[in-house]
Amino acid sequence: MPHFTKTGQGQPLILIHGFCESKEIWIEMTEALAATHTVFAFDLPGFGDNPLSKKEISMESLAADMADWMERERIESPIVIGHSLGGYVTLALAELLGPRLKGIGLFHSTALSDDAEKKHTRNKVIAFLEKNGIDPFLESFVPGLFAPSKAVHLESRIQWLIREGKRSSTAALIAYTAAMRDRKDRLDVWKHFSGKKLLISGRLDTAVKIENSRQLQPFADFYLELEDAAHMGMFEEPEKCLKTIQVFMAN
């Protein structure tokens, strides 16, 4: 099966999913965005339809793989938007390709590296996965990505995301958790990127805290702060997120 989907015509837009996700998270948005753009949704290795072929990965290796894929598909001057982990890959790609990207977006993501507390949390995740495997991890992890006020009526979406996450392996989740823990700070990449920049954050996000996002806000051309959302704005506040992305794309 293909590791990406391609929909629509026009300026290329690449959407990169987050940790324990797949290209399927973008389905609803793709339909609207494809009215004006060629939208590519990509499965990172180890997620969705793309098997993990390496034991160890890094943001740099993922960015290099994406650059090779862009060359094969003849994708030029794309806008790249990444959710969470996908944002880390987006920034590594921006560091690698610079002005060859027309714009970048961080969707519940950050340019800052993990602090000591976050690294400790990542190490606990790795230990839990090694001991218990993927199923119990996802069943506790995914619901926590949603604001409590949204979780009840989005229960079917949460269960779908858990099933989607279970398409991965314990080894893949461990490899990505280590890669996120060890990624370097790319605040300078964010500050000095020459194209347009979009930042979407959730005030109730416990994965990327709002204080973290606000450090990046002064360098963003377009900023949306969702008052009643956590880490999954595309499901918690879909209309606001889509409208902001459309305005960003139009500019």
Image (cartoon, rainbow, N blue to C red):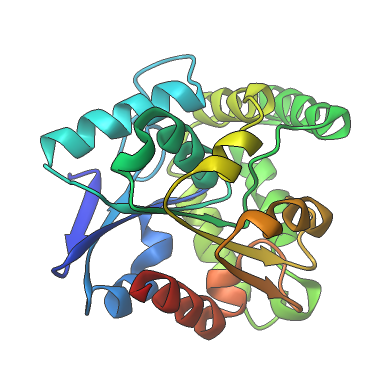
Image quarter for residue 103?
bottom left
Residue shown at 69%/59% (left/top)? 217
Q: In this rendering, does residue 172 appear at all?
A: yes
Locate residue 76, reporting x and y percent: 19, 46
Residue shown at 69%/52% (left/top)? 216
Report how many numbered discs are placed on residues in the image.
Answer: 0
- Furthest toward the right, the residue is 117
Locate residue 5, reporting x and y percent: 22, 56
Q: Is residue 5 above or below residue 20?
A: below
Q: In this rendering, does residue 156 appear at all?
A: no
Residue shown at 78%/68% (left/top)? 203
Closer-to-camera residue (187/74):
187
Closer-to-camera residue (154/114):
114
Q: Is residue 46 above or below residue 167?
A: above
- Furthest toward the top, the residue is 55
Locate residue 126, reporting x and y percent: 70, 25
Image quarter for residue 99?
top left
Side (left or right) of 131 relative to 158: right
Closer-to-camera residue (82/251):
251
Residue shown at 59%/66% (left/top)? 158
Side (left or right) of 247 relative to 162: left
Locate residue 114, reporting x and y percent: 75, 32
Side (left or right) of 69 relative to 184: left
Side (left or right) of 125 relative to 24: right
Instruction: Pick the quarter of the image with the N terminus.
Output: top left
Instruction: Pick the quarter of the image with the C terminus.
Output: bottom left
Image quarter for residue 143?
bottom right
